[in-house]
């Protein structure tokens, strides 16, 4: 897989370790403050919105790392109806091609694209006791190398306070960010589908710039 995402079908889901075995056939599993491979329920065991039943806006994960995750995988192990209900609700996955969204922004408002490419801001993870993680330096939303868009950091929950910038005001940044947010939130920018037990979703985030949203029990 060079760009985008892939679905791996017929993965056993009665034991999370079967998912772990699939991932280890792709690559090693990166250790973070969450551990390596892990499964969880919406029980707020960690101070993270992923551990709730709340719907999540499209976002990129691990913006607070110097090198954010390049490949991520999700497996819906269980999707049971609520007590008294016949059908399970929610848990849809939203995928957005962040590079395409950035290109649309550039074509529609080159100044807004420039602001998100140059205005550097802090990213952090500090919800858990004893945890305060940030990258080695401040980074813009749209990160370039050799003149090409290389990485997107887009997560409202991980974004720190906007610092003062010599070239642009905070109002400039928020206006540019609002325009980008409108693009990634458009229905024609999103691929929405329901994961089912037995299907593993793997996303290549680094080059493709996938902005994802999951509100499933993994």
Image (cartoon, rainbow, N blue to C red):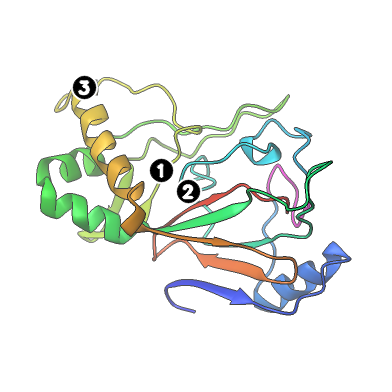
Q: Is residue 45 left or right of residue 57?
A: right
Q: Secondary structure at mark 3?
A: helix
Who's the residue at 66% across and 50% down the image?
A: 216
At horizontal 14% and vertical 28% (from top left) the residue drawn is 167
How many numbered circles are shown?
A: 3
- Mark earlier in primary sequence (3, 2): 2
Q: Dot 2 surroundings within 10 Å: few (below 14), some, or many (20 or more)? A: many
Query: Residue 114, relative to residue 99: is it above or below?
Result: above
Q: Which residue is mark 3?
A: 171
| Residue 56, numbered label | none
Magenta segment includes 118: no
Residue at 69% of width from left, 68% of height from top?
28
Mark with earlier residue (1, 2): 2
Q: Is residue 182 above or below residue 163?
A: below
Q: CA distance from mark 3 to mark 2?
A: 23 Å
Q: Are marks 1 and 2 in contact (CB under 8 Å)?
A: yes
Q: Earlier in the sequence, mark 3 or mark 1?
A: 1
Q: CA distance from mark 3 to mark 1?
A: 18 Å
Eyeballing the image, is 68 above or below 21? above
Task: Name the residue carrying label 2.
Answer: 60
The image quadrant of residue 130 is: top right
Percent of width and height locating residue 87? 73, 53
> In the rendered structure, which segment of residues is drawn in magenta?
32-39
Query: How dense is the environment of label 3, judged by Cα within 10 Å: few (below 14), some, or many (20 and up)?
Result: few
Cα distance in 3D space between marks 1 and 2: 5 Å
**Dot 1 corresponds to which residue?**
154
């Amino acid at each position: 897989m060079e760009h985008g995402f892939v679905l791996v079908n017929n993965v056993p889901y009665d034991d999370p370790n079967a998912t772990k075995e699939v991932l280890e056939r792709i690559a090693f599993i990166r250790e973070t403050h969450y551990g390596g491979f892990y499964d969880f329920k919406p029980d707020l065991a960690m101070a993270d919105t992923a551990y709730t039943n709340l719907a999540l806006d499209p976002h990129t994960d691990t913006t607070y790392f110097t090198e954010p995750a390049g490949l991520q995988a999700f497996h819906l192990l269980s999707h049971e109806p609520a007590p008294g209900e016949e059908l399970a609700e929610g848990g849809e996955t939203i995928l957005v091609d962040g590079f395409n969204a950035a290109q649309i922004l550039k074509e529609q408002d080159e100044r807004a694209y420039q602001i998100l490419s140059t205005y550097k801001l802090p990213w952090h993870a500090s919800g858990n006791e004893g945890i305060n993680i940030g990258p080695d330096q401040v980074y813009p939303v749209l990160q370039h190398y050799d003149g090409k868009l290389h990485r997107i950091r887009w997560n409202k929950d991980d974004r720190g306070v906007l610092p003062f910038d010599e070239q642009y005001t905070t109002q400039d940044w928020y206006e540019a960010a609002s325009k980008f947010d409108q693009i990634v939130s458009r229905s024609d920018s999103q691929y929405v589908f329901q994961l089912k037990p037995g299907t593993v979703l793997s996303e290549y985030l680094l080059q493709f710039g996938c902005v994802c949203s999951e509100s499933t029990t993994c």
